[in-house]
Image (cartoon, rainbow, N blue to C red):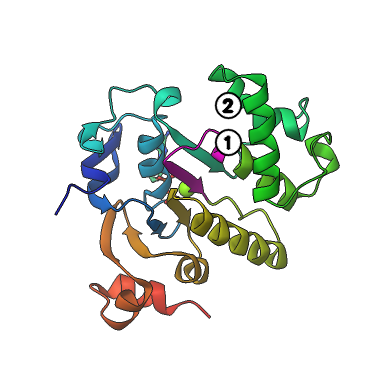
Amino acid sequence: MSDPFLQIRGIRKEYGKLVAVQNVDLDIRRGEFMTFLGPSGSGKSTTLYILAGFESPSSGDILLNGQSLLSTPSHLRQIGMVFQRYTLFPHLTVGENIAFPLKVRRRSKAEIDAKVREMLRLVRLEGFEDRKPAQMSGGQQQRVALARALAYDPPVLLMDEPLSALDKKLREEIQHEIRRIHQETEVTILYVTHDQEEALRMSDRIAVFSKGVIDQVGTGSQLYAEPATRFVAEFIGDSD
Ligand code: ADP
Ligand code: MG
């Protein structure tokens, strides 16, 4: 078998005396939708920030296509991000927000214009190009954030509780959009949520975090049928 696309190897992160995550080992396939599920404080975001390059691990390594990522600075990692508070630039229009990562990468104007149109179509916001973020709903803003994150075709997309500020109906609508986009593009998604239902609905596989370690990795039905720990049984079983 060829090497997995993304390999997380023995990641540990300490903040002073606090061990935020330890022994995090995970192989992620190209194109997979992998969810980090767990309660608040279990180490999901820390792991994602290490992937993003916002934090360095105390030990361990991350390999993308067999190459260590850790020496690559955050902005060169080819990883798109949508975070709950990683908000849009308020002074830029929707189109300018989506164009931003392409301008940084010095793409031509023609390429940028074409890509902005393609991304607006992908997130179903045609006609919104000249609006400012403040003139749009929270759900529309998150779709723009998604368009911006995907604009330069990163092979990996990280999403940290991107929908937690939205109401239930909007959340379900955007969950659906994210799944559709995952199917239409080849992007590999690492998705963080504390919501069991959301994890079960969206993911190819789920890594269940508890107190800084991964208790179990599997499909939703594997976790349901054969929980490895009491914690997994109770946490997964909690969904209504
Ligand atoms: P989750 O995303 O699952 O809610 P986090 O990864 O944010 O969990 O946090 C894991 C643990 O690490 C928590 O105990 C949290 O308080 C701690 N932690 C996270 N970031 C920092 C930081 N910058 N400084 C100190 N402790 C932190
Ligand atoms: Mg978090």
What amino acid is found at the position of numbered circle 2 in the picture? Pro
Label 2 sits on residue: 101
Question: Which quadrant would residue 132 be assigned to in this image?
Answer: top right
Above-or-below relation of 209 to 90: below
Which residue shows up at 25% across the image and 44% down it? Answer: 8
Above-or-below relation of 2 to 11: below
Mark 1: C-beta under 8 Å from nearest atom of ligand 2: no
Which residue shows up at 28% across the image and 28% down it? Answer: 70
Left or right: 230 as drawn, with respect to 110 = left
User: Is residue 157 highlighted in magenta?
Assistant: yes
Which residue shows up at 50% across the image and 47% down it? Answer: 159
| C-alpha gap between disc 2 and disc 1 | 7 Å
Q: List x then y, in percent, for residue 62.
A: 25, 37
Q: Which residues are magenta?
A: 149-160
Q: List x then y, in percent, for residue 73.
A: 38, 21
Left or right: 40 as drawn, with respect to 97 = left
Above-or-below relation of 59 to 73: below
Above-or-below relation of 129 to 184: above
User: Is residue 71 highlighted in magenta?
Assistant: no
Mark 1: secondary structure: loop
Left or right: 117 as drawn, with respect to 154 = right
Toward the viewer: 80 or 19?
80
Mark 2: C-beta under 8 Å from nearest atom of ligand 2: no
Residues under numbered marks 2 and 1 in contact, where contact means CB atoms less than 8 Å apart: yes
Mark 2 or 1, nearer chain start: 2
Left or right: 44 as drawn, with respect to 13 = right
Q: Visible in this render: residue 89?
A: no
Label 1 sits on residue: 151
Q: Residue furthest front?
A: 110
